[in-house]
């Protein structure tokens, strides 16, 4: 059938900037969404007041953590959250349109509204249709979302009208199985403990007193798997808590080739390195709404209070709306202000990042200038020492580390001296370089894991984000203060002190490794002891 008009702005309505959507490539309309279907949307509200640049700088300057001033979560809510008046205006809008107010959160600047497809369509001036695409069927829209003109200054984003899958996990399984999980294996596969030792992570630390948050958009874990895995490793099983976001739950599929692999890889890598830390797994639907709500819920969680957030899901920048890019980046700015380190996988499809249009792409949220973007290497070792480390690139079908130059975010000040090249696309945009750091990711030198009762070997940059998250938990424990936003320190004094192993061999497609920072492995893989030493001064 032909596609009906996408937007029907009623009365005095204006579009929400950056809310425009287009159908997924290859998708076709199969009919209207069911008018009586109950759905929920998250309305993102502006900050109470513009952030004080001096306060923001205090948490992101290239100074040791002990010299930084972080906000408490209560302070952040009071100074950078949504105002009661703005929240009340969204609630009044909901009542006027027959929508229910499900949740109001000033710190997250969000109001969750519920209603039928018909009510939401009228309230936001959109037409919701069912689209069929190679992966299934989703409820979608095209064009912008509309709000009343008097609410336009208040609303920064509306998420949830469209429920297309937003992100992909960044793991790759090796073709062979690992047999059994061995606590000190030395071969072309490693336990997380092996990798931590090769990277000289500071010993005698287990992340005690820290909470590592992990975002998952599908799958789940079983206590049986965790008990068996950590028992075989010979380390205590960390306390793992599942947190439900937008109705999603810890739901293991039982398929070791499915999303359970992502969930258990993240928990097993982070938990092996920091078994004394609390592991909080935030399960959310795989939509832009679910992903954003999981991130903001974790960052602003006053009960579990994570000090580090690991994200192994993402997608090329071009697949995101501008309102989503903006909303996530603002959330990561909040994380920096709180002293929360955010580690994001840089992707597993090389410089094309899964988009086959002949152009280079970078993965988001790794391309946010307020996260630690984690790329991948091939790590070879013998007798407990690294013998060779190169860019992970197993060819077009085997996967390769993501990396490149953002065409959505400008070059940050802390990266100004890194000689980030123009993007390898016509026009050569100058932007934020990805990744910042790297770690073992090649599945052929991958991590021994246990998924749904089956031992195996998994790689991908999905393993690098929790690897760095576990390191950060150890650093926080020793320093007794969160290291927070690491990037200015990594590009400044830590790089100068040789706290990273520079990777100078290999490429990810459009970009090649070189001396210093490059768009394959960033500044390099970690020397944990030197990083701790550099942060202690």
Image (cartoon, rainbow, N blue to C red):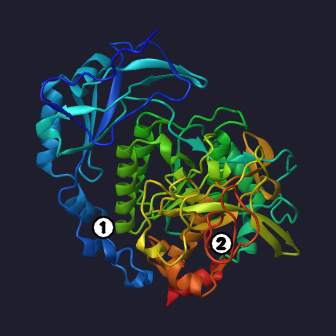
Q: Is residue 303 left or right of residue 319?
A: left
Q: CA distance from mark 2 to mark 1?
A: 32 Å
Q: Quadrant of residue 507?
A: bottom right
Percent x, y of residue 390? 77, 67
Judging depth in this view, the residue of 401 and 441 nearest the camera is: 401
Judging depth in this view, the residue of 210 and 530 nearest the camera is: 530
Camera sees residue 532: no
Residue tagged 2: 524
Q: Quadrant of residue 419?
A: bottom right
Counting residues from the start of the chain, the first of labels 2 and 1 encountered is 1
Percent x, y of residue 327? 35, 49
Residue tagged 1: 72
Q: Is residue 215 left or right of residue 332?
A: right
Q: Secondary structure at mark 1?
A: loop
- Is label 2 or label 1 in front? 2
Percent x, y of residue 212? 52, 60
Judging depth in this view, the residue of 517 and 120 nearest the camera is: 517
Q: Secondary structure at mark 2?
A: loop
Camera sees residue 502: yes
Is the residue 336 above or below the residue 516 in the image? above
Q: Quadrant of residue 466?
A: bottom right
Near mark 2 (Cα within 10 A), the count class, few <14, some 14-19 or many ≥20, is many
Percent x, y of residue 33? 39, 15
Give the residue drawn at x 24%, y 28%. Answer: 124
Give the residue drawn at x 52%, y 85%. Answer: 493
Give the residue drawn at x 36%, y 14%. Answer: 4
Residue found at the very far top of the displayed protein:
1
């Amino acid at each position: 059938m032909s596609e009906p008009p996408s937007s029907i702005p009623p009365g005095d309505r204006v579009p929400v900037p950056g809310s425009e959507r287009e159908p997924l490539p290859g998708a076709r309309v199969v009919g209207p969404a069911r008018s009586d279907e109950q759905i929920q949307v998250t309305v993102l509200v502006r900050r109470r007041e513009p952030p004080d640049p001096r306060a923001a700088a205090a948490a992101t300057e290239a100074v040791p953590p002990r010299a930084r001033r972080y906000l408490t979560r209560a302070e952040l809510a009071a100074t950078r959250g949504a105002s009661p008046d703005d929240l009340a205006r969204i609630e009044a809008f909901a009542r006027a349109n027959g929508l229910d107010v499900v949740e109001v959160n000033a710190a997250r600047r969000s109001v969750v509204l519920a209603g039928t497809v018909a009510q939401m369509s009228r309230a936001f001036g959109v037409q919701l249709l069912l689209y069929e695409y190679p992966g299934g069927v989703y409820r979608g829209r095209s064009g912008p979302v509309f709000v009343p003109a008097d609410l336009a200054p208040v609303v920064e984003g509306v998420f949830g009208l469209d429920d297309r899958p937003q992100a992909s996990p960044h793991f790759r399984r090796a073709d062979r199985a690992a047999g059994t999980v061995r606590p000190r294996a030395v071969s072309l596969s490693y336990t997380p403990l092996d990798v931590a030792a090769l990277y000289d992570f500071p010993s005698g630390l287990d992340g005690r007193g820290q909470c590592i948050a992990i975002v998952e958009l599908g799958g789940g874990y079983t206590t049986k798997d965790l008990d068996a895995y950590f028992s075989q490793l010979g380390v205590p099983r960390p306390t793992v808590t599942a947190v439900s976001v937008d109705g999603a739950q810890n739901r293991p599929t039982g398929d070791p080739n499915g999303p359970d692999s992502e969930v258990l890889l993240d928990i097993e890598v982070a938990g092996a390195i920091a078994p004394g830390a609390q592991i909080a797994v935030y399960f959310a639907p795989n939509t832009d709404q679910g992903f954003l709500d999981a991130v903001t819920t974790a960052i602003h969680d006053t009960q579990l209070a994570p000090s580090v957030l690991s994200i192994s899901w993402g997608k090329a920048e071009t697949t995101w709306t501008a309102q989503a890019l903006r909303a996530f980046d603002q959330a990561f700015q909040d994380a920096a202000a709180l002293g929360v380190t955010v580690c994001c996988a840089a992707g597993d499809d090389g410089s094309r990042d899964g988009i086959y249009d002949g152009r280079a792409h970078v993965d988001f949220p790794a391309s946010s200038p307020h996260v630690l973007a984690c790329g991948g290497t091939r790590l070879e070792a013998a007798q407990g020492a690294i013998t060779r480390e190169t860019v992970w690139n197993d060819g077009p079908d085997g996967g390769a580390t993501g990396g490149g130059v953002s065409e959505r975010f400008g070059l940050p000040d802390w990266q100004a001296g890194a000689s980030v090249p123009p993007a390898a696309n016509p026009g050569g945009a100058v932007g934020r370089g990805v990744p910042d750091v790297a770690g073992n990711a090649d599945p052929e030198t991958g991590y021994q894991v246990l998924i749904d009762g089956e031992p195996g070997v998994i790689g991908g940059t999905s393993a690098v984000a929790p690897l760095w998250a576990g390191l950060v938990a150890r650093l926080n424990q020793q320093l007794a203060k969160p290291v927070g936003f690491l990037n200015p320190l990594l590009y400044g004094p830590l790089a100068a002190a040789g706290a990273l192993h520079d990777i100078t061999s290999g490429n990810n497609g459009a970009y090649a490794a070189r001396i210093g920072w490059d768009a394959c492995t960033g500044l390099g893989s970690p020397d944990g002891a030197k990083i701790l030493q550099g942060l202690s001064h």
